Image (tube, rainbow, N blue to C red):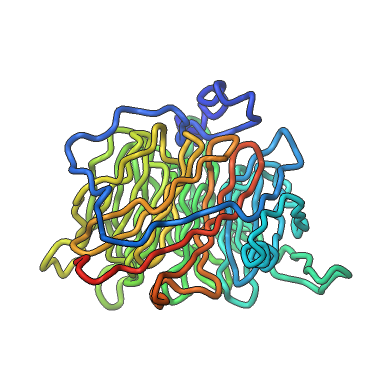
Amino acid sequence: MKSSAGEQEESQIQHEAAEGSMLSGAMSLASQPSLRSLPSLGVHDLNTSPSFHRCIATLRGNSSSSYVSALAVDGDSLYIASSDGRIRLWALDSARRSREDHQQDDTCSSTTVADTGSSVKSLLATGNGGLLLSSHHDGKIRAWRAGSSRRDGTRQFILRAVLPTAVDRLRTCLLPWSYVEIRRHRRCTWVHHVDAVTALAVSPDGALLYSASWDRSLKVWRLPDFRCVESIAAAHDDAINALAVSPDGRVYTGSADKKIKAWTRGGPGQKKHALVGTMERHRSAVNALALGANGKVLYSGACDRSVVVWESADGDVGGRMEATGTLRGHAKAILCLAATGELVCSGSADRTVRVWRRGPENAYTCLAVMESHGAAVKSLALVYGRDDVSSCSSEGASALVCSGTLDGDVKIWSVFIPCLLPGSS
């Protein structure tokens, strides 16, 4: 079933055609009025030393007809997925050397490790034996494993599986009850996504893979055999754009229907997921989700230009989230988020990236605004590498922020994270 958002893919982005962009109708670049019902959480004076950021490396796009659709980090490797179906590898060590030399490298090169044959929508590096997962516009999920090393030291990735697998397709096609109606006079088995797969996430124990799609469904796959074990056919009323899984196993989905939903498995022995909460604050399509503070804080970004902050409700053993405020500053739709620890990054159609830090009493400081992008920022990755914000020196620490845009460029930024000084609480 082609979702209403999926059918509008090209029409929604005509105003970005000059930048060679292609986005879904669900994830529109069009901005909506900002939220007014929630207090702004920034900017708060935390008595910190001045922040500092700079671009240390840029990987130029080599095609005017494709954009950077997803980024994923695995150790010192940055994987870059594009709308032309290619997955490239960029070693982060080169960017770190540029930072140490206080120089910007504009001559970076990447290596193509996989040509998937379909536009990539999301990318997930599991860290499990070199397993790399990609989801696609054709409704498929592809699993890759690193193969033998090439002359340049990089590895070509080998396609291990395409989901749903042939085994899944065979076992379901023989059972009449396995078929569901996807549009008038057309039926398909329940293991198939019938529209673009927009988001992937893995359970904390690595045993389950979750996938969300413009077809409004949420599917659960068993690892490592990639068997589809569950499908929630109408998880939302419109296309699903984002997915996040907390350390306690709670699954969050964000949709073009303006809602965020929380799902969890039942008690002991229960295999199916149930809806345990619906969160409604945004006035427009939810484009991105990210979890921070060890899963205690959920961030959601939408076309209303705001990042809503959701905190665990006090005394709620069920893990219910409540909206506590918004992070404002972007002039256009929020397209992507990345978070780890007390840091969260937001990328926008206004061509900027903002880096925020959660401080005492849940107050937020905007540490940096990166403004030199040539197009809307579609994807983000937040990397600490050898540095750790939680173990600051006397002055602070640094982090790497990777940003991919609709003109095909990828930039790596070094961001100084100042430590909280005495008296800041």
User: Which image quarter is the C terminus in?
Assistant: bottom left
**In percent of the image, x 45 and y 30: which residue is there?**
4
**In percent of the image, x 24 and y 35: which residue is there?**
35
State the image coordinates of residue 330 (x, y, percent, origin top left). 38, 37
**In percent of the image, x 53 and y 43: which residue is there?**
378
**Front in this rendered view, residue 274 or 242:** 242
Q: Is residue 259 left or right of residue 367?
A: left
**Front in this rendered view, residue 170 or 85:** 85
**In percent of the image, x 73 and y 33: which residue is there?**
64
- Is residue 124 visible in the rendered image? The answer is yes
Question: Relative to 170, does residue 323 appear above or below in the rendering?
Answer: above
State the image coordinates of residue 348 (x, y, percent, origin top left). 46, 39
- Is residue 173 visible in the rendered image? The answer is no
State the image coordinates of residue 228 (x, y, percent, origin top left). 51, 62
| Residue furthest out toward the left | 315
Question: Relative to 198, does residue 9 appear above or below in the rendering?
Answer: above
Question: Relative to 92, does residue 17 appear above or below in the rendering?
Answer: above
